[in-house]
Image (tube, helix red, strand yellow):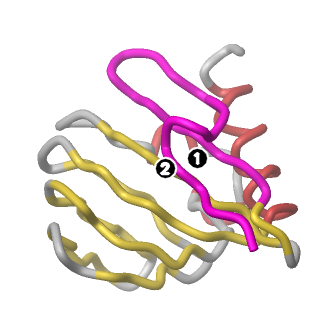
């Protein structure tokens, strides 16, 4: 068995207050430690994906803050202390500084990360 920590996880994306760390966890899954500063809206970076939404499922836990998850059928707000499952077809927006840990299928997650990096120009 392997334990994962935020500090021991490589940075996948950063800048503008965003701190996104990801590593493979085994079984085709990855773990990510994500900090989004208040006001971060990932919808623009998801443009061009199917439905202009993230198509990777995520299972996670909110440690700090509040995050709005928008889908084609509505939206829901998640707060510190809540676990979640976000199915394919979502776009997050940080309503406060937010810290989450989440688990996602590696191949699908990598495709979304590559798209977001390309949208950000790097």
Query: Is 7 placed left or right of 55 in the picture?
Result: left
Circle nearer the N terminus (1, 2):
2
Check the image and report above or below for 66 versus 72.
above
Query: Is 89 placed left or right of 92 in the picture?
Result: right
Res 46 label: 1
Residue 71 % position (x, y)? 42, 74
Q: Residue at x 38, y 82 (%)?
A: 84
Check the image and report above or below for 110 versus 102.
above
| Residue under label 2 | 33
Residue 22 % position (x, y)? 65, 46
Q: Disc 1 on helix, strand or loop? A: helix
Res 72 label: none
What crowding class fits label 1: few (fewer than 14 Cα within 10 Å), some (14-19), or many (20 or more)? many
For the N terminus, give its image quadrant.
Answer: bottom right
Residue range in magenta is 1-24
What crowding class fits label 2: few (fewer than 14 Cα within 10 Å), some (14-19), or many (20 or more)? many
Residue 75 % position (x, y)? 27, 76
Query: Is 26 placed left or right of 31 in the picture?
Result: right
Q: Residue at x 33, y 39 (%)?
A: 36
Check the image and report above or below for 86 versus 103.
below
Residue 122 in which image quadrant: top right
Q: Residue at x 56, y 83 (%)?
A: 87
Q: Is residue 67 magenta?
A: no
Query: Is 78 placed left or right of 34 in the picture?
Result: left
């Amino acid at each position: 068995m392997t334990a994962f920590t935020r500090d021991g996880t490589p940075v996948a994306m950063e800048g503008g207050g965003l701190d996104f760390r990801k590593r493979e966890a085994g079984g085709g899954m990855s773990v990510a430690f994500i900090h989004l500063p208040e006001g971060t809206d990932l919808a623009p970076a998801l443009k061009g994906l199917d439905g202009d939404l993230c198509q990777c499922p995520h299972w996670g836990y909110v440690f700090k803050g509040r995050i709005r998850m928008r889908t084609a059928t509505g939206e829901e707000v998640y707060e510190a202390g809540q676990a979640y499952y976000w199915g394919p077809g979502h776009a997050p927006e940080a309503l406060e500084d937010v810290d989450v840990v989440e688990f996602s299928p590696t191949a699908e997650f990598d495709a979304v990360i590559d798209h977001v990096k390309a949208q950000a120009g790097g």
